Amino acid sequence: MADTPLRLLPWNSPEGRPCYLSTDDPGSRLSRLADEVEAELIACGEEVLGGAESVLADRAAGERAVRFALVRTTESLRDVLRVAECRERQE
């Protein structure tokens, strides 16, 4: 297992530090959980993007709606970039 690269997981420790998985089994329970979380983060990002596009298309949308959309979009972008980083490290 010493030759197995560490997998960056799509979540942090309670202290805010990155979590890593050391396994040579991509079908392990924790590997599958990480895959599911990554898929959920991407799906959430797609949903948030759609909502933000709707807010931006609505000329009557107020500042609060635009700020909310931007905050959620920023959160989702951070999550999707983490997924991209996780997958980049797997290659």
Image (spheres, helix red, strand yellow):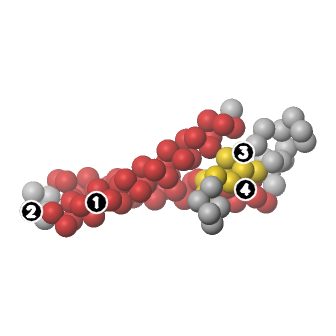
Mark nearest the camera among 1 and 4 is 1
Q: Which of the two discs, 3 and 4, labels the residue nearer the N terminus?
A: 3
Q: Residue at x 42, y 49 (%)?
A: 77
Decide which of tag 2 and tag 4 comes sooner along the chain.
4
Q: Quadrant of residue 17?
A: bottom right
Placement of 85 over or under 36, stated as above or below: above
- Mark 2–mark 4 distance (CA, rounded to whole Å): 43 Å
Q: If you read the primary sequence from the N terminus, does the residue marked by circle 3 or circle 1 appear first?
A: 3
Query: Does the image show residue 61?
Result: yes
The nearer-to-camera label among 3 and 2 is 3
Measured as percent of width and height from the top left, residue 66 is found at 21, 60
Distance of mark 3 from mark 4, alpha carbons? 12 Å
Q: Which mark is residue 84?
A: none
Q: What residue type is disc 1 on?
A: Ala
Report x, y in % for residue 33: 70, 60
Element under disc 4: helix
Q: Which residue is mark 3?
A: 7
Which residue position holds label 1?
Answer: 69
Left or right, 29 with reference to 35: right
- Front one among 63 and 59: 63
Quick one: label 1 or label 2, which is nearer the N terminus? Answer: 2
Disc 3 + disc 1, Cβ < 8 Å: no
Foreground tag (1 vs 2): 1
Which residue position holds label 2?
60
Q: Which residue is mark 4?
A: 32
Q: Using the rendered image of the protein, determine whether residue 37 is visible from the camera's viewpoint.
A: no
Check the picture and name the quadrant holding the N terminus. top right
Q: Amino acid at mark 4?
A: Arg
Q: Which quadrant of the rendered structure holds the C terminus?
A: top right
